[in-house]
Structures are given as C-alpha cells and as structure tokens.
Image (tube, grey):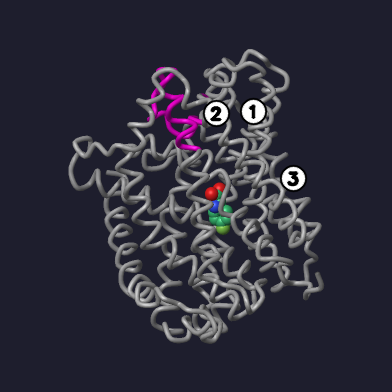
Amino acid sequence: MKLKKEQWSSKFGFIMAAAGSAIGLGNLWKFPYVTGTSGGAVFLLVYVVFLLLLGIPILLSELSIGRFAGMNAIDSCRKINAKWGFAGSFGIVGAFGVMSSYCVVGGWVIRCIINAVTDTNMNAEFFGDFSSRTFEPILWTFVFIAITCIIVSGGVSKGIERVSSVLLPILFVFLISIMIYSLSLPNAIEGVKFFLVPDFSEINGFSDFMRIALNAMGQVFFSLSLGMGTLITYGSYLPKNSNLASSTVTIVVLDTLIALIAGFLILPAVFSFGLEPTGGSGLIFQTLPVVFSRMKGGSFVAAIFFTLVLFAALTSSISLLEVIVAWICDKTKLKRRSAAIIVSLLIFAVGCLASLSNGAVPELSFGGMSFFELLSFISDKIIMPLGGFFICILVGYIWGIPNAAKEISNDGKLKFGMKWLFSTAVRYIAPALIAIIFVTSVFSFGE
Ligand code: PFF
C-alpha cells in the first residue's frame, strides 16, 4: 500500500496503535486495584458514566485537533488559536510525571517475568519484599526505561503500529483464557458480585463519593491517555478520509473491554484466595502469582502473561516518551537519540525517588502519600484533567463546534448524528464535571 510516510498505513493499524497507547498498565494493573480500593461496583458505574461524558468527547476532540492541524500537540493547539499552545503543553509535563512512576511499575513487571521463569514457588509475600528493597527495583526501572528509550531513539511510527497490531490480539486471547480459569475458581462469584453489584451503603457520605468520583475521573483520563497530547499527535498521522467518530468509539470500547477483563480476572481470584481487594497497587503482583502457582504449568503461563503486560506497558510508555522527545526535537537542535537519552535519564532520576518511596526511604512522603503515589496523583488527577478541561474550552468555544464538526464529518461527507451530544458534553458537561471534582479534591487533599 503506497501512502505518505507520516500516515498510518491502515485504519486497523491506527486503531491498534492508539489502543496500544491507551491499553497498558492503566488497564491491567491500575483498574483492578483502584476498583478494589474505591468500592467495587459503585466505582465501575461512575467510571462508565465518565467514559461517556468525558472520555468519548475529549478523545474525539483531541483526534480532530490533531488531524486538522497535523502537528505536535502544542503547535496543533496553536494552529487553532495562537494563544492556546499551552493547552497542548500539559502533555509534556504530564508525560514526564506519568513516565516517572510508570517506569517503576514497568520494572516490577520485568521482575515478575524473571521470577516466573526462575522461581517456581511463587508467593504473595515476594512482591512486598521486592518492591520495598533499595537497589533491585531501581535496576529493573532502569531496564524498562532503557528498552523504551531504545525503541523511541530508533523512530517508532511504523514500529508501534506493527508491534501493536500483533500483540494486542494475542493479549486479548490470553487474558480471556486466564479470566475463564479465574472465574472457575471456588468462591469466584464473590469477586464478580463485588465488581458488578453496587453497594451504596458502603459509601460514607459526600466526601467519600467525591473520592470515588475523583478516582474514576483520574482512571478515565489515565486509561484513555487523555489530556496529554498523545492523541493529538496520533491524530495528526491520520489520513483526511478516516472516520474520527467511529475510531474514537472503537478505541474506547477496546480499552474498556481489556479493563473489564482484567477486573474479571483479578477480583474473583482475590476473593477465591481470601485476599483483600483493597490491597492497593500490589494487587496484580501479589494475587496473580498465587493464582498461577496453583495452575498446572503455572510458571509458563505467568511468564507469558507478564511478558504480554510488559508489551502492553511498552506500547504506552513509548507514546509517553515520544510526546516529550518529539517536542524537544522540534524546539532544539538535539538529535532524536540524544533527546531520548537525556529525557530518559531525567525520568530515571525521578523514578528512583519514586521507587525508594515505596519502602526503602519512607521519609519520601508528602501529605500522607508516598512520592510514588503523589506523582500519580498529580499527573492523573491534576495535570491530565486540566489538560482535558482546556481541550474542551479550546474545541467548544475557541475553535467552535461548527469547525470541529466539519473536521469530524470530513467536510460533511460523513454523518455526525451525535453532534448535539458532543457539543453539550464538550461545552458544558465535561468542563463543569472536571471543575467540580477538581476543586472538591484540591480542597479535601490531605484531609
Ligand atoms: N493509557 C496508558 C495506560 O492505561 O497504561 C497510560 C498512558 C499512556 C497515559 C499515554 C497517558 C499517555 F499519554
């Protein structure tokens, strides 16, 4: 197929690449544990509502800005209005923050693969012990960043598309198989109930509900890679005849499907083995090894599972590093490789602090949160929603719905039936929701 160099080679390839950025640790690691600590099914309900009211409109807005302008995040926003480059700049700061904690978790995943291959006697204690050590987690953090850096240094647009197109379908099949096993465990139904049947009596007042809402909003932004310029950049590689609205829906459906499968995989196993769903960020690393250790050929399955998690994480981390590197290459004379190495080293420095704050140096904590938790709080609950807020204002009021609709409908060639819904969400619902939740959370921070 002969196409211009800077475009995706097929619709399938673009969907896989964009879904590759979206699907990652956010779905497989974060979604199950945040669901566990945020009230199970109540969280799921709020999450789905936010997907519709925030996720779809903002994702569609970002893709249309990118395809319209055809440039990096900051310059694309600037093309719409010369004073609005800052709306894209959230991505640069946010990507740095997200990557600094993402690489620590990526390191844990690599350690789990090695553990599965070398240690047949997997147990739940291993992870707690490992993640609070001083040097070992830092070493694996470094390995994860180094792999990301090498791929980004070499240029990724073809690579991302090809790798994601093969790996995502494999990930899908594998996750479903392990999910079926997990659902067949004794007492698994308790996990299913926790995940699907809302128990509103568990919510202790308004501030507890706002905590759940903030977690759900943060998860929607994090999981769909919103407010970070990634989708503006990916949208800029789209051909003009692509269907933005249907691509948006497909990406959201795929991302949500993987998150749901991860929930159905982890939570039933947690209940079946009598573990706590509120265990926090170690959930996938503590629970799954126990599940695998009871399976026939469990080490083999564990090795494959964590390898797939690693690939899913890499397709996301590449997109994060790429946002920063592409911008630096545009603004300075630095070569792609040098930019990738410098940024990776800076991320590694912050990542080391994040890793140490998990136990080795407990003093690295602020307002009751470890530095690791603080990084993810700032990026997915402050920077990403703020980025999303400004994208809504830019599209809804500065660029204007008629112009956005013109781009989305390919100059009127495609039907854009949900225009009024898109308009209402982008102009009123999404900015208002983000503002309310944001302000409430900032005021309750540290309470
Ligand atoms: N969406 C990714 C995940 O769920 O793991 C994380 C991520 C990637 C967030 C890229 C933001 C981003 F720009």
Identify the residue under disc 1: 112
- Which of the two labelled residues, at mark 2 and mark 1, occupies the earlier sequence position? 1
In the rendered image, the vertical position of residue 163 relative to residue 118, given as above or below: below
- Residue interval drawn in magenta: 262-286
Quadrant including the N terminus: bottom right
Q: What residue is disc 2 on?
A: 285
Q: Amino acid at mark 2?
A: Phe
Q: Secondary structure at mark 1?
A: helix
Seen at 66% across and 38% down, the residue is 308
Specify the quadrant that holds the C terminus.
Answer: top left
SS at circle 2: helix
Residue 155 drawn at (x, y percent): 78, 60
Q: Quadrant of residue 43?
A: top left
**In-front residue for pair 20/115:** 20
N-terminal of the pair, mark 3 or mark 2, is 3
Near mark 3 (Cα within 10 A), the count class, few <14, some 14-19 or many ≥20, is some
* Amino acid type, callout 1: Cys
**Residue 98 on image: x %, y %:** 55, 51
* Most distant residue in the top direction: 121
Cβ–Cβ below 8 Å for labels 2 and 1?
yes
Q: Where does label 3 land, which residue?
A: 146
Could you give the CA–CA distance between mark 3 and mark 2, rounded to whole angstroms?
22 Å
Identified by mark 3, the residue type is Ala
Q: Is residue 20 magenta?
A: no
Q: Would you call the spot at circle 2 few (<14 residues within 10 Å), some (14-19), or many (20 or more)?
A: many
Q: How many neighbours does mark 1 have within 10 angstroms: few (below 14), some (14-19), or many (20 or more)?
A: many
Give the mark nearer the N terminus: 3 vs 1.
1
Q: Foreground: 224 or 177?
A: 177
